[in-house]
Image (spheres, rainbow, N blue to C red):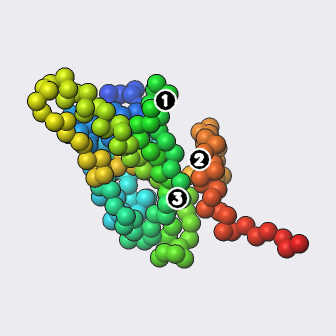
Amino acid sequence: MGDSNVNLPPGFRFYPTDEELVVHFLHRKVSLLPCHPDVIPDLDLYPYDPWELDGKALGEDNKWYFYSRKTQNRVTNNGYWKPLGVEEAVIGRSGNKKVGTKKYLVFYVGEAPSGMKTNWIMHEFHLSDSASTSSTTSSSTRSSKRRAPKKIDTSKWVLCRVYERDEDHDDGTELSCLDEVFLSLDDLDEISLPNN
């Protein structure tokens, strides 16, 4: 990552948790609220292959972060992002409230469905409807009882984290049990069971 991408003071690093990405960044983006520091750029992901993100997205420690419009078309110039079909809930600090979801995608080079799987992984964060409704309802009831609470349209924006998984080098980062399960689901097609 080049330091020119980040507008943080020297010594500060960008290592947000899933909950911080959803609550402090994505929710503020969707709500049209200012975010300080404003370091995550808007990016139309799909014209770019994952190795082209450096210099376009916020990069920190071989992970790239950006906002993107939600779309079903995840095709790039040289491949496509394939969803693994499983979502993980992002839970708030209180431990009992779902604030968003995290979807897992893997990048394939070539045309669907016969592309070649790569080590590029994307976490696509979405706001939960209940998280946006409760926060807008509480703020609007404080301001005026005459106005009806506005519902935030959570369907337009997602926050993405993209990284390349390095199978040969252990960098000390451990995947959660759910990460391991989600990433292994895509390998089920390649496993052949013995005939009895």
Q: Amino acid at mark 3?
A: Gly
> Which of the two discs, 2 and 1, labels the residue nearer the N terminus?
1
Horizontal placement of 117 versus 145: left or right? right
> Which of the two discs, 3 and 1, labels the residue nearer the N terminus?
3
At 50% across and 53% down in the image, what residue appears?
104
Residue 90 image point, x, y percent: 47, 39
> Which type of secondary structure does the marked residue at label 2 adopt?
helix
At 46% across and 63% down in the image, what residue appears?
81
Residue 70 image point, x, y percent: 33, 56
Q: What is the distance, in whole Å, between disc 3 and disc 1 at their CAs?
A: 24 Å
At 12% across and 33% down in the image, what residue appears?
147
Please name which of the two marks, 3 or 2, marks the residue nearer to the observer: 3
Label 1 CA crowd tier, 10 Å (few <14, some 14–19, many 20+): few
**Is residue 65 placed above or below 195 in the rendered structure?**
above
Contact (Cβ within 8 Å) of mark 3 with mark 1: no
Q: Mark on residue 96?
A: 1
> Which type of secondary structure does the marked residue at label 3 adopt?
strand
Please name which of the two marks, 2 or 1, marks the residue nearer to the observer: 1
> Which of the two discs, 3 and 2, labels the residue nearer the N terminus?
3
Label 3 CA crowd tier, 10 Å (few <14, some 14–19, many 20+): few
Residue position marked by numbered label 3 in the rendering? 85
Q: Amino acid at mark 2?
A: Asp
Between 34 and 98, the one lying in front of the other is 98
Horizontal placement of 143 versus 24: left or right? left
> Which type of secondary structure does the marked residue at label 1 adopt?
loop
Q: Which residue occupies the extreme left position in the image?
A: 146
Q: What is the distance, in whole Å, between disc 3 and disc 2 at their CAs?
A: 13 Å
Residue 167 image point, x, y percent: 64, 53
Between 192 and 97, the one lying in front of the other is 97
Q: Amino acid at mark 1?
A: Asn
Q: Is residue 31 visible?
A: yes
Q: Is residue 17 visible?
A: no
